[in-house]
Amino acid sequence: MVRKTPGTALVTGASSGIGREFARYHASKGGAVILTARREEALESLKAEIEERHGVEAHVFALDLGAAGGAKKLYDAVKAAGLDVDILINNAGFGGHGAHLDRPLEDELAMIDLNVKALVELTHRFGRDMVAGGGGRILNVGSTAGFMPGPMQATYFATKAFVKSFSQAIDHEMRPKGVNCTVLAPGYVETEFADRSDLNGTDLVKGGGASAESVARHGYDAMMNEKLVTVNDPKLKFAVDWIIPMLPRRQVLKMVKGMQTKK
């Protein structure tokens, strides 16, 4: 039997990887979940798992957030269903390997549409509702890529730099109104991301990465503790906070390109 519980979390990109683990972890805390991604079958499977295992409500909205009007379509559907969002987890996003001029322009623009524009729109729409309702939490999934420029993934790195900057600014704006925003900036994570981004064969993924479960739990707990920016790996955190800023910019560019060049 499904029981209604307070604290509903909307998770984008919930069909796999970190997004799926966010949904599982929140449900394990007793909170209802709203699941969205393009793959309806995967979402329905996760919904059934969550409801059976944790006895909380799970709602599915299968759509493409990167498509024109996708974010508004999701917002309208959630409101029409009479659901209130207490926690917004903006996890949906993708990358793409290759020199900018060698990649299809439509793929680069689609990346901006999903990684940036959809995130901004959902943050704005649900953020307003949270302020009006007296509080809420937002977790935006960035990346350690957001701390530096990234030759061979120029647009992806730039989108994550946007997420890091935007999220910190709006946290400062909304915090007095009861809403906090946290940026989760993981390094490489063992998900479908490497396959979709065509990163296999690069040093970036050669050594393996963190599990999606551990990253999701780290980010979720940081959000609940109202952290501003969090990196899941202490060594990576030291690197992006202290080493990268001290290096000459062209050295950083050369290093990142080397890590992302297929051997």
Image: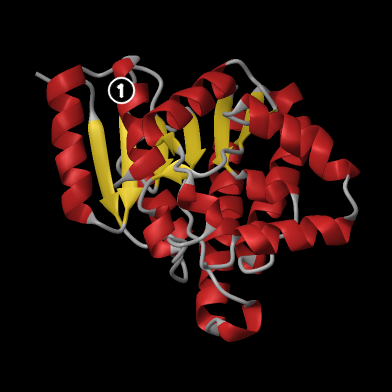
Q: Nearer the viewer, residue 144 or 88?
A: 144
The image shows residue 31 at horizontal and vertical percentages of: 34, 20
Specify whether 32 is left or right of 111. Answer: left
Q: Which residue is mark 1?
A: 27
Q: Residue at x 43, y 69 (%)?
A: 67
Q: Amino acid at mark 1?
A: Ala
Specify whether 50 is left or right of 52. Answer: right
The image shows residue 19 at horizontal and vertical percentages of: 39, 40
Q: Nearer the viewer, residue 203 or 66?
A: 203
Specify whether 149 is left or right of 71. Answer: right
The reply to whether residue 16 is in sight is yes
Above or below, comparing residue 217 to residue 156 in the picture: above
Q: Which quarter of the image is occupied by the N terminus?
A: top left
Q: Callout 1: few (<14), some (14-19), or many (20+) C-alpha neighbours within 10 Å?
A: many
The image shows residue 149 at horizontal and vertical percentages of: 74, 59
Name the element at disc 1. Answer: helix
The image shows residue 11 at horizontal and vertical percentages of: 40, 39
Q: Residue at x 35, y 14 (%)?
A: 29
Colour pattern: secondary structure
Above or below, comparing residue 104 to residue 246 in the picture: below
Specify whether 152 is left or right of 18. Answer: right
Can you tell which quarter of the image residue 109 is in?
bottom right
Q: Residue at x 51, y 24 (%)?
A: 218
Above or below, comparing residue 130 to residue 113 in the picture: above
Residue at the left extreme, as displayed: 1
Q: Residue at x 47, y 27 (%)?
A: 86
Can you tell which quarter of the image residue 208 is in?
top left
Above or below, comparing residue 242 to residue 149 in the picture: above
- Label tally: 1
The reply to whether residue 166 is in sight is no
